[in-house]
Image (spheres, grey):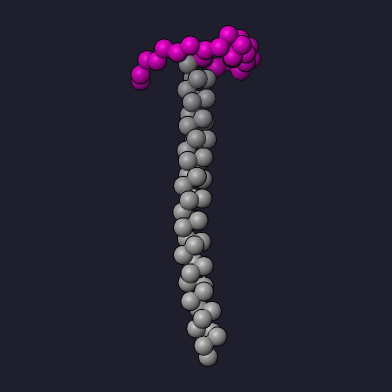
Amino acid sequence: MKTVSLKIDDSIFGETEKILSQINKTRNRYINDALEYYNHHQRRILIEKKLKVESELVKNESLIVLNEFEKIDYAD
């Protein structure tokens, strides 16, 4: 495990402490769980952005192919 020092806004720290007292979880575990959740969320956002770019590329290429097929159909 790595040791990290961080500054937390007073309001966030206070709210976190209240929640921790109710859920019986250590601060360290709570922060690790929160980071894991946020990392998962950010990975999904990155994948979504990449998928949009790739979908746009495929869309443009698909339209070109579709136009070529339409030309073939009308040629008959």
Residue 62 location (% of width, % of height): 49, 67
Quadrant position of the N terminus in the picture: top left
Residue 74 location (% of width, % of height): 55, 85
Q: Which residues are magenta?
A: 1-27
Indicate whether residue 9 is drawn in magenta.
Answer: yes
**Vertical comparison of 48 with 69: above or below:** above
- Residue placed at 59% from the left, 14% from the top? 12
Residue 24 location (% of width, % of height): 58, 15
Residue reaching furthest to the left: 2
- Residue placed at 51% from the left, 61% from the top? 59
Indicate whether residue 25 is drawn in magenta.
Answer: yes
- Residue placed at 46% from the left, 47% from the top? 50
Horizontal side of 1 relative to 54 (left or right) equals left
Residue 70, located in which quarter of the rendered image? bottom right
The reply to whether residue 42 is in sight is: yes
Q: Nearer the viewer, residue 23 or 2?
A: 2
Residue 61 location (% of width, % of height): 46, 65
**Vertical comparison of 40 with 63: above or below:** above
- Residue placed at 51% from the left, 40% from the top? 45
